[in-house]
């Protein structure tokens, strides 16, 4: 899905649950009259997006010092890169969630579209690079592996962002404008986006339950992640199809998926792939301290 809300990739933009507007023209570019207060999201909608996003950034900040020490101790280039990218995506996501009003402020159209593209690119890069890294037969932590992974994800994300930029700025397709609900180009783009992601996660699950499962990494958390993302992207694909047909329930469902994505995806990804790394470090340090104390004779009296 798109990261405005992409894709998943993140879903870059979603129609508001309470503000569903159908327009007579679905192919013409939005006029200046489109950007008015009647198309703005309400305070509750913005709060529903912003508060969880802000809490996650606060959580990351609270553990920042401790996590930096652990990353320095382990010296894992892969984890360092993903932790930095997670921070980048979290901050962009918070900005996107907090600035929903830009959609209906005259003169902010370009700024909103650029912010949406950046938000989607950060989250999509994080998602694709994680999958690409874990699907490698030999996932090490070297710079060569990291460079190869980000080269693959960078090419995919670059092509995706370029295509969306052409749609938005070249053909004036309102990809990130929630008030526009009937534009066929918009729903066609998001349908294609979600179809690719659904097929990708579906293929991973197919291989996992086939005779070729030995080719995949033996990480149960990765397959739980793939199951969740397959279901989310599948529902988003279904919602896009309904919205493209003019069914109001499709707009509501796509909006709901977008809210869930922007508030839950990054925390879900953190808990799945990064939290264990930092907790594991605590156990390693405890074992190291125990070994040092044992070697120094602190526990000799226990055996007497």
Image: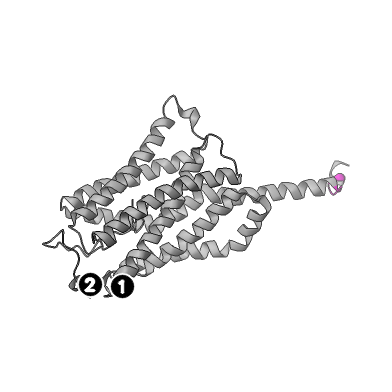
Q: Quadrant of the C terminus?
A: top right
Which quadrant would residue 95 be assigned to in this image?
bottom left
Residue hosting label 2: 35
Mark 1 element type: loop
Measured from the top left, where is residue 252 in percent x and y? 24, 56
Task: Name the residue that disc number 1 marks.
Answer: 108
In depth, the one of 157 and 37 nearer the eye is 157
Q: Residue at x 40, y 61 (%)?
A: 118
**Residue toward you, 194 or 161:** 161
Where residue 99 appears, as percent x and y from the top left, is 36, 70
- Quarter of the image for residue 226 reads top left
**Figure disc tally:** 2
Q: Residue at x 40, y 51 (%)?
A: 157
Q: Position of residue 52 (x, y in %)?
A: 42, 63
Q: CA distance from mark 2 to mark 1?
A: 9 Å
Mark 1 residue crowding within 10 angstroms, few (<14) / some (14–19) / many (20+): some
**In the structure shown, which secondary structural element does the residue marked by tag 2 occupy?**
loop
> Is any atom of residue 124 visible in this view?
yes
Q: Is residue 62 above or below residue 143?
A: below
Q: Position of residue 21 (x, y in %)?
A: 17, 63
User: Which stretch is magenta?
Assistant: 296-300
Q: Say if mark 2 contacts mark 1, CB within 8 Å.
A: yes
* Residue 6 appears in view: no
Q: Is residue 211 magenta?
A: no
């Amino acid at each position: 899905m798109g990261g405005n809300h992409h894709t998943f990739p993140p879903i870059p933009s979603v129609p508001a649950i309470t503000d569903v507007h159908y327009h007579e023209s679905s192919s013409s570019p939005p006029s200046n009259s489109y950007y008015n207060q009647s198309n703005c999201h309400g305070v509750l909608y913005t709060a529903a997006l912003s508060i969880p996003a802000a809490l996650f950034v606060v959580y990351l900040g609270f553990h920042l010092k401790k996590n930096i020490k652990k990353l320095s101790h382990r010296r894992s280039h892969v984890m360092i890169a993903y932790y930095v990218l997670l921070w980048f995506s979290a901050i962009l996501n918070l900005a996107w969630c907090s600035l929903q009003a830009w959609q209906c402020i005259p003169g902010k159209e370009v700024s909103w579209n650029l912010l949406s593209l950046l938000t989607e690119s950060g989250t999509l890069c994080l998602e694709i690079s994680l999958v690409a890294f874990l699907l490698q037969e030999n996932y090490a932590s070297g710079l060569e592996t990291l460079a190869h992974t980000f080269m693959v994800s960078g090419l995919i994300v670059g092509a995706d962002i370029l295509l969306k930029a052409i749609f938005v700025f070249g053909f004036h397709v309102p990809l990130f404008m929630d008030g526009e609900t009937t534009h066929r180009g918009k729903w066609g783009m998001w349908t294609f986006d979600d179809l690719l992601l659904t097929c990708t996660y579906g293929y991973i699950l197919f291989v996992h339950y086939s005779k070729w499962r030995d080719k995949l990494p033996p990480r149960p958390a990765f397959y739980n992640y793939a199951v969740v993302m397959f279901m989310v992207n599948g529902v988003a694909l279904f919602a896009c199809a309904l919205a493209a047909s003019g069914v109001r329930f499709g707009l509501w469902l796509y909006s709901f998926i977008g809210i869930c994505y922007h508030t839950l995806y990054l925390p879900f990804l953190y808990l799945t792939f990064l939290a264990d790394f930092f907790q594991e470090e605590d156990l390693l340090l405890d074992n190291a301290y125990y070994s040092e104390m044992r070697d120094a004779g602190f526990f000799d009296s226990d055996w007497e």
